[in-house]
Amino acid sequence: MKVLILPDQQAAVQRAAEIVARTVIAKPDAVLGLATGGTMLPLYDDLARRHRDDGLSFAGVTTFNLDEYIGLAPDHPCSYHHYMRETFFDRVDIDPARTHLPQGDAPDPRAASLEYDALITAAGGIDLQLLGIGQNGHIGFNEPTASLGSRTRIKTLTTDTRRANQRYFASFDETPRYAITVGVATILEARKCVLLATGEAKAKAVFGMVEGPLSAVCPASALQLHPRATVVLDEAAASALELTDYYHHVHPQGGESVFD
Ligand SMILES: O=P(O)(O)OC[C@H]1O[C@](O)(CO)[C@@H](O)[C@@H]1O
């Protein structure tokens, strides 16, 4: 696991966006695994800006999002379908037919989950998987105790996650209880993973992911098994890490430490 510590949120977001941009430039028909959540908002802003100002094209790219709330139709304003259109898809030249998210309002969400997993495989697998991390260590909606061998399926959201996401809904009661999420094993099959975490609220989860034991209690720790996982942090998200000498520090004055 390569851990990059950037001086602040903006620098961390920029570095993660650079990794996505480089992947798309090197492979214009790349398959990207995409994430949602507050952390990703400035990253999609950055990518949309690179499209507008630098001509970064997503025309040949295929995308698969990690998750969607069960019960929300794609046009629901709190759905991740809506989030992705607003924050990214409608701002770049991506072909909507090549964008995929789990169908939250599928009549049979179990069957829809299996089909979604198979669709990722049929597309040739994910070249670059973008990830955020929940305060409880979840990736996608793989909540603590999620099997590290799991495939795309229905997960019950923890009260903590529902509280954290309540801000997007009218009330806690209206915050969905279930989601379809890509599984941990499906995530680990991506050829490369980039996890972005910013802010002090993520520090404990980041510690569990990077320095904690490999455990389903912190699903993000599964990235320890991935041969090409990069974790991009700002100083605040990195603040609980103890083995600081082992990481790749990017200093505000310029220059980087040699460890990575
Ligand atoms: O960036 P946030 O809003 O803290 O969310 C953290 C993670 O939780 C999720 O919302 C659940 O999938 C992810 O999309 C996100 O990466």
Image (cartoon, rainbow, N blue to C red):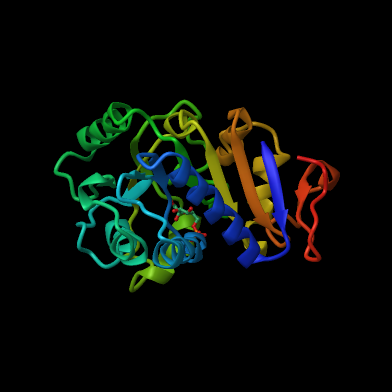
| Front-lying residue, 234 or 162 | 234
Q: Is residue 36 left or right of residue 256?
A: left
| Whether residue 168 is visible | yes
Instruction: Name the residue: 49% across, 51% down.
Output: 21
Q: Residue furthest bottom?
A: 170
Residue 136 in view: no
In the rendered image, the residue lying farthest to the left is 107
Nearest the camera: 60 or 116? 60
Left or right, 37 with respect to 210, comes to left
In this image, 40 relative to 209: left or right? left
Q: Quadrant of residue 10?
A: bottom right
Nearer to the camera, 34 or 134: 34
The image position of residue 60, as x and y in percent, is 31, 45
Q: Work out whether 196 lies above or below 155.
A: below
Residue at coordinates 44% horizontally, 45% vertically from top-left? 24
Name the quarter where the C terminus is drawn: top right
Q: Residue extending furthest right?
A: 245
